[in-house]
Image (tube, rainbow, N blue to C red):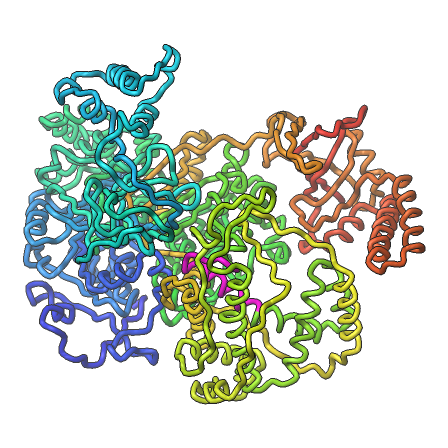
Amino acid sequence: PRFPSPLLPPPLPSPPVETRARARTANCEEKGASAMSAMQVEKEGKPDGKLKEDLSRQEGAYGSKMIGKLKKMKCAVFGLRGAGIEVAKNLMLAGPHTVMVHDDEKVTIADCGTNFYVSPEDVKESKTRAKACEAALSEINPNTYFRIHSGDITAECVEEFDVVVFADQVTPLAKLYEINEYCRGKGKDFIYVTIHGMLLSIFSDFGPKHEIFDTNGEAERSVVIDKVEIVPEPYTNVGEFLKLCGGKGDEEVKKLSYKDKKLTAIEVLTAKMGITMDEKRQKSITVTEILELAGSNAKTCKEKKCGKITVVGQRHLLHSGDHVKFEEIEMSKKASEGKSKVFKIGETVSDINSTCEIKTHRTNSSVFYIGDISGLGEYKGGGIGTQVKMPVYKSYKSMRETFSAPQMEPAFADMSHFGDGPKAHIAWAAVQTFFQENKRLPGHCDKKDAETCVEIAKKFGWADALGGVDESFVTKVAMFAGTETNAFAALAGGIVAQEAMKQTGKYSPMDQWMHFHALQLLDEEKAGKPKGDRYDHYRCMFGDTFVKAARKAKFFLVGCGALGCEFLKNIAMTGLGCSEEGEVHITDDDVIELSNLSRQFLFRRRHVGKLKSESASGSAMEMNPDLKKGLKLHTSRVEPKTESEFSDRFWGGLDFVVNALDNLKARNYVDTKCAIFQKPLFESGTLGTQANQTVHIPHKTPSYQEGSPPGEGQGIAMCTMTHFPYEPLHCIEWSRVMFGQLFEDGPSAYEDLRKSGAEKYLEKTGRNKSEEHGILKKTLKWIKIASDPTLTQCVKLAMEYFIHFFRDDVKDLIHAFPEDARNVDSKTKEDKGPFWHGRRRFPRAHECDTKNPDHMEFIYRTSCIFADVFGLTKKESYPDKVKVTEIAAGLPIPKWEPKKDLDVQVDENAQAEKKAISTEEYDEIQSMRAEIKAIDVSKMVPIFPADFEKDDDTNHHVDWITSSTNLRAWTRKLKQSTRQHCRMIAGRIIAAIATATAAITGLVFLEVYKLLMKTDDINEYRWSTINLATNVFAIELPPDPAYKRTRTEKSTVEEDDEIKKVETKITCIPEKFTSYDFVEFKTDGNVLLPALVEAFEKQQGVKLTLLAEKGNNKGKAIYQTINEGVWQMQKKMAERMVKIMRNPMQKQEAQARLDSANAFLEQAKKQKEAKFLDAYVEAYGPFTDPKRNFVVLEAKVEPADRELDGNERIEIPAIKCYFN
């Protein structure tokens, strides 16, 4: 077989009765079907018979609770055409307990264009789809029980399953109704999906009562309490105010219009409070302001009290109805004893350190309300709050009920087809009814069948309630009802598989129908007839011209990870570049890891350790052997260093580029190349259940780098991480930084010296004056440490760092800020209250105790990593913990002495000031430099700096992070963190799942189809953002290009300790240019720079002041205007200062100014004599691409006839400078 069958498992212990169904080898009726267990015998097998797996990326999205439920979930998938095989594949990747599939239809040659696990051989052998896919599906996940079912579909077939998915076009409505009703009665979830041409329809029914423990999957938010007050309960709305304060009755209030309610409220307010409002104020005042005024006045407020909570920071990001668990809040009266409970809004809170429902403030995002706390006295201090997600229960209707009265998913928004859901539902219903009556789908482009469908739709008595029948819409759906595309199948498979996993109670099920279409791509006149090959679906929809264009396409797929695997599958199914004339360039320099297997479906266990691009292409060629004709395999990273491989000629020969990258730097590089060579770029990305895709067409959309700006930064303030952590996250991030300082930075500095030699090393360190002292000190420390590479030295270092981090640093902080310290303004000396308040948590220190297992855990892990650094583990294994404990117990523990020069930054927003080097520091630097110069580096023993690796469970790295995190958390009375959580955060593991990846690549390929159709109208393309957790689908038109226009920019500058506003006029030449526009300039590579500058100025009519490589961040220029007279004067002054200065530091500063003046004068001289290409190569290095005949430059220019004002600037496009 094309896909090797997994080995049968060894005999297993008898499973519990309720789980024995997973081991059955017959179909639901115990006859007629074969099955394959997905268990394999491998060396890494676990005691329970299952194989080792790494679900860290998946757990990052789902969490351990959902993973646990997922492992027990059993799914049945009926139908294995395009959508069905995608659903089954994604479920197998997710790893539920059991997946059963059914499809007794024979494989057709057209199936090979959407089902990636069938082949022409299966057609010849008359296999059913289920049998043809059996081996490949079962191999995806050896820890999921898999089998196929054949025969009739009955209620008994789905009895053991938690989720039932129908994913075909040929199940009659009566059968769907029957199974759906059975599932509702048995507490099972039912999902239906079908594709009719370019119409995707999905229905979801989670029964009469479905529990959701987490509606959106977002992390629980935490807040730090700043203030707790007892205030009158706020008014909910103006109607409540009129009834309680204005004496109005319910019926009287209901009769009032919004405007009348507002005017009446103003009358009540002015009468009760004794204030007056003129006509202008009465018009401008808002209802929110009215209610705020009413709630703040004793005469108009409610009598009932509530708790007003103010948090530290500008916003809490919570919503009304959320629940918050409070801890550590001190009130003047003791809470009443009793069992903790959840307090709703309006209830009397007997213990504030409980879970409370909240109501947000109307305007103040740092305030929310809870129930009545008036019995608890005054607020004394402290307090943190953590969001608690409470169970939500929802009910859903059956397919029969919603057939004529569909509930459309409200979060689905296709802005280009807004409101098309009802008409799409009518079209779907007409086609399904046609099938019910005729036992077949409407014929391809059969006008008679299409007319019949229209007549069926017109007979629907409920159609008018949905807006009536759109005859052209129904006709187009009917004429292409039997076709499907891989793009829609991938989209459907991602959505539906994720929907199935919502059975676990995490995320919100769809409510309840979703119809998505791209019927605008279908044209009866262009539609072709089948030719009996794998591309018939595409030919029948888009025509033979499309198929030929697709197969001749020349493109570049950058990356073969999760996105790349899905793209390669889509490429194989569509036949993209799959001919002698086509070119499918793919590259990825990464190797496959165990964690990839849960979402990168082209890889199996046999591929672990191999290159992704090689393994992925091999799997894709099995799906479509035609891919071999156009495949151009690369294994290099796309970057400036590889431009000999990915040359100008390479980029120029492409039709388009598809990015499947996971880092911004590489994406920006590819985007730059696409802009230079005017190539369309298809971009996409995922984060957990969220994903987005964008298409970038030269001159018609923004480039990728000009897209939407990133979200607001949420970095941790340095003073928070260093001294005042208030969340476990801060402790994890601190530990990751400390890991670098202990095991990476110092050893790396030592090795740099050993390999470079003293002279080169000191030259490098001398370039960074502000950090030179610290680097030299660290290097000398490690020279001393490395002279004694023994286990005792490792343990000694571990003890020193334990005492330093968890005892001395904490006691130094307490010494500087005792528990009763006050927060005093440094300028006004105003007392602002207790220092230890809000986010600042008063710490407690550890006293090193080798009998304390938590202390020894840190010391042991630290010793092991130091043993790696010293190379001790290259000769023998890691040290025994008992031995480390014995050594540690024998080491003396020094007494703590207060630090004299402790400098604690307490302001989160303060910028670290650059301090001038003191005379003492300068002397120390000179002394250390002399000491290093005297070292014989040939006698330095090599050591091995650590490189943090999150995926190696044997290297102690994650264990060290976990131990360090929890020891630090204890000092601030914070919650302990699990090893997995520490691994996720410290390892920067990005939550990733197969479903979102599959769905977004389907949307990307929909845009690729449009390009292949030579669609010129940019309004036909789409950008999409989706969230499968909350069913958000935002599909919209691409924005306009990012035009550069003449404008005035406003900014602020600090001058003489004052903030001043500055306006800068920017003139663009030409007006409205984009990143795809270039100034083209031709020259000779050997032309002298002055001649080149003169020629450019003459051509453009401007004065050139600076010329540099586009996007270069090295601070180097090929040419810049230099005023030699000014620099000659600077040189003379500096020479004089060097001679007369006696202070070493001042002498050094004068020498630096002299060096700078000489450098500018030397550059001015060289510019007059330098040839253009020689100057370019000297500044930026030789060309990686030896055949390059142009460079891209950026220039600063001024008007030719005048000088620019100080607040004036001219912008021109980048320069594409051709040379011979």
Classify residue 973 as left or right of residue 1183: left
Please, which residue is most extreme toward the top here? 279
- Image quarter in which the N terminus is found: bottom left
- Answer with left or right where residue 322 lies relative to residue 873: left
The answer, for residue 696, to whether it is visible in the render is yes
Bounds of the magenta segment: 723-741
Q: Quadrant of residue 278?
A: top left
Residue 732 in magenta? yes
Residue displayed at 25% across by 16% down = 264
Would residue 704 be found to the left or right of residue 249 on screen? right
Q: Nearer the viewer, residue 1110 or 276?
A: 276
Q: Residue at x 72, y 84 (%)?
A: 939
Report which quarter residue 1111 is drawn in.
Answer: top right
Return the x and y of residue 495 as percentages of the image width and height: 28, 48
In-front residue for pair 626/1220: 1220
409 or 85, which is in the foreground?
Answer: 409
Helix, strand or loop for the magenta stretch, by majority: helix
Q: Residue 959 occupies which quadrant of the picture?
A: bottom left
Pick the quarter of the image with the C terminus.
Answer: top right
Q: Residue at x 16, y 80 (%)?
A: 13
Which percent across, then down, holds residue 752?
68, 71
Tell me if residue 165 is in the magenta stretch.
Answer: no
Work out whether residue 1179 or residue 133 is closer to the camera in this orientation and state it: 1179
Residue 837: image location, x then y, percent: 44, 52
